[in-house]
């Protein structure tokens, strides 16, 4: 805290440094203005945009081309699959009609069981004709299929009307009728062969299309794979000449200036952003050279101020780093204290008590080392806060809690969490001072623009010679106290534009009074 207070006056020394910065700008403003219109300012941006647009267009074109090629190949493969299925059905139809003719022959020679086989083959042939009729889309093949179906119907008619009655009546002439069906069978086979040949030609055509698309896609992919690196290399060389080289020159110049060479000048004679940046860089180094001595002096002063401020941050950092291991220690003690007995249990209890005390000190240090923050003040019911604190103390102290009573009401202007922290510290001190048989009274009242919360106890009170010290950090009259609770409470009260005072309670004991601004009338 003392370090923070010491470093504060240094803020007043910043004005000369700011003046030096203004002098730099003033010196720069005396230089000739930079020339160059939009082409000078945006030339590099335009080159980058064009380069990446070309690459993006190339990738998009290649992707769309490959996608179109794959789509066409997929369409051809789908057509191939369909025509392969048509060819399969044609072969099955030819096999079914041949099976019909074969079952007819076996039936004629006296094998009556083949009549059922004929009917099955006949049904299969009709089903295949229907499937083919739905799949074929060429008028010529549909005509051949229709002729095949008509011939198969005629073949069935001859078998049903002429051959079957003769065979069943055991008369002669069945074979002669069967021989007459040979032309029908030949016609059917001829038509099916023509359908199959036509489909095979279509399939061969689709295969050729697929191969053509594959070759085209492959050629384009090869051109893309070869051309893209060459184009990218060309763009990289172009960007290297127009961007990387000027950047390297600027970086080298900045390094020389950083090393203290304020006579450095950068020569980039281009009408783009880098040329403008080089001109501004040269103006900056010229201005820095003029104000170098003043800037060095102010930098030394700022370094000294920063060192002083760092000392305060180190204290906060140490407190923060100690808080984590203390939390781990307390956690392990809490896990193990119920598992041990005897002397070791007493040692653990002592360790837990001392570690908790260290944790309280560390947390208090964290609060004290943090810089003041701006509070967003809202109306807070101090009576409700007091009741919350009383409930919290009942849980914390248990049987050791004295009698607590709350009176009055008042709406303060502040933050609920901070006021809760202040009231808790005051009430906890009062409870510790009153002991189990004592009494603690929390009285809330509002008078004018101020709300008061007075915490009275029946303890031994505070001696007059100590009242000026009890709000100082690390001052305590308790054997196990940290001396930070009251100092934090007053710091919070001051941040809320209030204060805390201590006096004697009527009838013995001490009374701590918190005074904070009252909320406007009607606020909730």
Image (cartoon, helix red, strand yellow):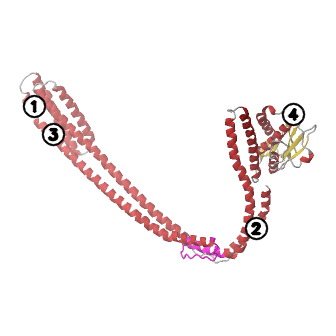
Where is residue 290? Give x, y as percent.
69, 76
Where is residue 492? Give x, y as percent.
80, 48
In the image, is residue 259 part of the stretch drawn in magenta?
A: yes
Structural crowding at the residue carrying mark 3, measured as other residues with C-alpha within 10 Å and reported as few (<14), some (14–19) or many (≥20)? some
Of marks 4 and 2, which one's residue comes earlier in the chain? 2
Badge nearest the viewer, 2 or 3:
2
In the image, is residue 398 part of the stretch drawn in magenta?
A: no
Q: Is residue 227 left or right of residue 181?
A: right
Where is residue 124? Give x, y as percent.
22, 32
- Quadrant into which the C terminus falls: top right
Q: Is residue 56 left or right of residue 358?
A: left
Real-space CA distance between mark 1 and mark 4, rounded to the nearest whole angstrom: 129 Å
Q: Which residue is mark 3?
A: 189
The residue at the far right in this view is: 507
Q: Which residue is mark 1?
A: 178
Q: Which residue is mark 4?
A: 438
Q: Which residue is mark 2?
A: 15
Real-space CA distance between mark 2 and mark 1, rounded to the nearest whole angstrom: 124 Å
Badge nearest the viewer, 4 or 2:
4
């Amino acid at each position: 805290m003392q370090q923070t207070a010491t470093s504060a006056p240094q803020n007043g020394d910043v004005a000369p440094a700011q003046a030096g910065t203004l002098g730099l700008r003033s010196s720069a403003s005396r230089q000739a203005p930079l020339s160059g219109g939009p082409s000078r300012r945006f030339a590099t941006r335009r080159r980058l945009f064009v380069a990446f647009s070309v690459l993006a267009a190339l990738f998009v074109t290649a992707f769309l081309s490959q996608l179109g090629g794959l789509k066409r190949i997929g369409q051809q493969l789908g057509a191939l699959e369909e025509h392969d299925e048509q060819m399969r059905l044609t072969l099955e139809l030819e096999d079914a009609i041949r099976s019909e003719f074969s079952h007819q022959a076996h039936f004629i020679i006296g094998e009556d069981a083949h009549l059922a086989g004929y009917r099955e083959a006949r049904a299969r042939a009709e089903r295949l004709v229907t499937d083919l009729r739905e799949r074929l889309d060429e008028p010529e093949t549909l005509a051949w299929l229709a002729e095949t179906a008509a011939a198969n119907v005629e073949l069935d008619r001859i078998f049903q009307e002429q051959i079957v009655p003769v065979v069943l009546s055991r008369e002669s002439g069945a074979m002669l009728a069967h021989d007459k069906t040979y032309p029908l069978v030949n016609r059917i086979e001829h038509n099916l062969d023509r359908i199959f040949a036509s489909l095979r030609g279509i399939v061969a055509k689709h295969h050729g299309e697929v191969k053509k698309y594959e070759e085209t896609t492959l050629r384009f992919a090869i051109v893309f794979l070869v051309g893209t690196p060459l184009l990218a290399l060309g763009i990289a060389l172009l960007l290297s000449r127009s961007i990387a080289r000027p950047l390297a020159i600027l970086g080298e110049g900045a390094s020389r200036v950083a090393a203290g060479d304020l006579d450095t000048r950068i020569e980039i004679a281009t009408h783009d952003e880098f040329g403008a940046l080089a001109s501004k860089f040269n103006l900056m180094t010229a201005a820095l050279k003029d104000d170098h001595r003043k800037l060095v002096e102010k930098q030394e002063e700022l370094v000294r101020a920063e060192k002083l401020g760092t000392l305060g941050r180190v204290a906060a950092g140490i407190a923060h780093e100690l808080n984590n291991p203390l939390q781990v220690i307390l956690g392990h003690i809490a896990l193990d204290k119920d598992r041990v007995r005897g002397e070791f249990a007493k040692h653990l209890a002592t360790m837990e008590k001392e570690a908790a005390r260290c944790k309280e000190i560390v947390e208090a240090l964290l609060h004290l080392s943090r810089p003041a923050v701006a509070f967003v003040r809202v109306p807070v019911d101090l009576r409700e806060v007091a009741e919350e604190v009383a409930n919290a103390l009942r849980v914390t102290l248990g049987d050791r809690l004295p009698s607590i009573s709350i009176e009055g009401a008042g709406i303060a202007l502040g933050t609920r969490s901070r006021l809760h922290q202040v009231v808790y510290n005051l009430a906890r001190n009062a409870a510790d001072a009153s002991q189990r048989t004592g009494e603690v009274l929390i009285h809330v009242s509002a008078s004018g623009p101020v709300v008061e919360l007075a915490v009275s106890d029946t303890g031994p009170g505070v001696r007059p010679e100590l009242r000026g010290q009890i709000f100082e950090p690390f001052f305590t009259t308790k054997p196990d106290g940290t001396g930070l609770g009251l100092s934090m409470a007053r710091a919070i009260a001051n941040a809320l534009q209030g204060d805390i005072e201590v006096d004697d309670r009527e009838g013995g004991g001490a009374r701590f009074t918190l005074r904070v601004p009252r909320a406007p009338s009607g606020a909730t």
